[in-house]
Amino acid sequence: MLVSSDYPYIQVRVTIGKYRLSYRALLDTGFDGYLVLPESLESQLGAPQFRVKTVLADGSESMRPKFRAAAEIVGLDLVYVVRLTLLGEECLIGQGIIRQLKVTFDHGKQVLVEP
């Protein structure tokens, strides 16, 4: 079991091609995708593997760069093959990963994550 007192964040390591990045990731239960990384990475990562129309929280639509990646939940040694989107400035973990885990948000103090 992973216990994070950095509520509601956990650590994630992401591998995209030759790049390996570590992030403090917000568990975003309202995001139905897998993973979002900051859009500032696009120049570093190069051309996206594909672009997909994405509906944002405000209802607007945008064509966003997407990549295939491996996401490791630090502390659980679990690795997921995911489609990640570059958007905004923060790392988000969405329902694509969350629903494969048992996640408990403990009274705003800590997050408990189990496989």
Image (cartoon, helix red, strand yellow):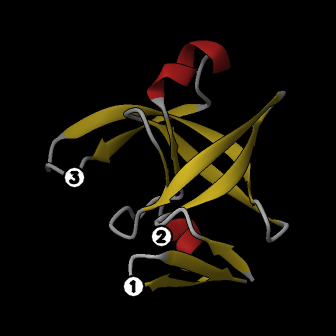
Based on the displayed image, in which of its 4 quarters is residue 97 positioned? bottom right
Which comes sooner in the sequence, label 1 or label 3? Answer: 3
Is residue 114 or residue 34 the one in the foreground? 114
The answer to whether one can see residue 100 in this image is: no
Residue depicted at 22% across the width and 52% down the height: 57
Label 1, residues with CA under 10 Å away: few <14, some 14-19, many ≥20? few
Q: In the rendered structure, which disc, 2 or 3, sits on the residue that comes first in sequence?
A: 3
Residue behind mark 1: 107
14, above or below 41, in the image: below
Residue under the point 16% across and 42% down:
60
Which is more toward the observer, 51 or 24?
A: 24
In percent of width and height, residue 16 lies at 74, 35
What is the distance, in whole Å, between disc 1 and disc 2 at their CAs? Answer: 20 Å
User: For the N terminus, which image quadrant?
Assistant: bottom right
The residue carrying mark 3 is: 57
Image disc number at residue 95:
2
Residue 44 seen anywhere in this rendered image of the structure: yes
